[in-house]
Amino acid sequence: MKQYAVPFAALCFSGLALLGCSDNNSDTKPQPAPAGSDSTDGIAGVWQNDQHVLVLETNGDLYLPTDNSLQGLRWEQQDDTLTFDYLDNREQRVTQASATGLQQDDTLTLTRAPAATQSSDTTETADPEAPAPDADAEAEAETESANDEAAPSLFNGDYQRANQAVGHISGTVTRPEDSELPDNAVLTVALLNSQIDPDTAGAQPVAKRLIRLDKDSPTLPFRLYYLPDDLKADHDYQIISQILADGGLFYQSDAITLERNPQGFADVTLPLTAVMTDSETLRGAITRGKPGQDRDTFTLCNSDRRLLIRGPQSDDLLSAYDKGIRYPQQPRVATVSGLVRKVPGSQEGSTEAALIVESFNLEPGMENCQLPTAELTHTRWQLTHLGPDRIILGSAAQVPFLTFNDDGKVKGHGSCNSLNGGYQRDDQQLALSDLASTRKACPTSTIEGRYLDALKASDHFRIDGELLTLFDKDDEAVASFQAIYL
């Protein structure tokens, strides 16, 4: 069968891969009674304060229905100490928080330990050779630190038992007979408002849950908790499930309309069907994306078709590429065998085509592989590297760029000051001259100085598809750019 796009193929959020570091795994044993059903004894149950709701199931599952950016994973009690594991989608990490818990009748008082412990590395990385961040980047870091402190506030203060504060949906997901569970599989279940198109920008599920699958069972129980105030009495609601692994979509259910009952919704069974594509052998060029953004691409030779690079062998492919290039972002041709699948896109609810790498052969040159090629003139060339160093600026900073006109004039920006001058071109020779810029002082002045020095050192150039590289007289790359068409 061929892969096809489905609404909410991107139900999993950016921390999906981090579930491999958590204990949030499925179990084929019968689920316990829903938290809060008749629970009045012990800490297990539903607890609420002015801002948050904690759902503590007797089997150790943790639910956080008031915050879509967090997913509860597990909770554990040792004497008077409670430990909470949760997935922080903003920070892209699995985090653990501890608190002392004192229960008196229907009041639970949590006193948070001094700091939360991060239990897996963040996915964002920066080039160690990259220039120091500017003031905007530092401000972003301060915001991230504030977010880190905000999440553990869930586990602090007085909570009241509130069995009616949440509703729940229980059900079972079933896989086809004789089907196989892929490695690193994650089950996603989401509650959707059927009156809202899931492809609408900004559309969010009412509730969602990700569960790491360790046992190859064809029957998978699940439970979703939701806030009753999030539902409208005159709206219908649907539930949908998928199994993903290594960024690819392997199984999916139809969106099933839920039946209401006096307790909320009736239990539901979600039959999954396989979503597959035949393995293909493709030949194309590899291009690296920005660090931490997972946007490395594979462009098919003699085509403008682009696929994101994914899968368990993608790291080996990209490592071989990095070792084999002479200058930053130099395209390299590879023959890759793998599966072409839809994967979650950069926008909520969107999908993109990706190549799930199974095996590869990296070729030494670009023979018989034409790529979409930009022209030197009338293209906005956005700076990506100075020498071997990737340029990473704060979100508010102007990214340096150049544009070449037909009349021998060049203009652009250095991240702080605008610049203009002239250029002389003779085939692949390229010299920039009479460069002048405004003289504002900015936190990015160091980068701008290196940028202007690189432009002045330019002797010749090379365009590889949509990548421009300037070389000095010693044939060393001094600046690299990405095409942004005007």
Image: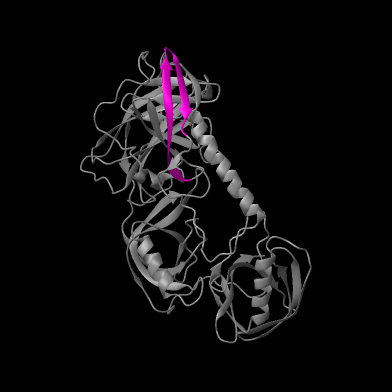
Image x and y of residue 474, in percent: 56, 86
Visible in this render: residue 16? yes
- What segment is highlighted magenta in the picture? 92-113
Image x and y of residue 351, in percent: 47, 49
The residue located at (42%, 20%) in the rendering is: 102
In the rendered image of this protein, does residue 151 appear above or below residue 284?
A: above
The residue located at (75%, 67%) in the rendering is: 418
The residue located at (20%, 43%) in the rendering is: 178
In the rendered image of this protein, does residue 21 appear above or below residue 132?
A: above
Nearer to us in this view, 330 or 219 = 330
Image x and y of residue 55, in percent: 41, 25
Horizontal relation, residue 312 to residue 208: left or right: left
Quick check: is 102 in the magenta stretch? yes
Quick check: is 426 in the magenta stretch? no
In the rendered image of this protein, does residue 410 appear above or below residue 306?
A: below
Nearer to us in this view, 187 or 91 = 91
Image x and y of residue 211, in percent: 35, 38
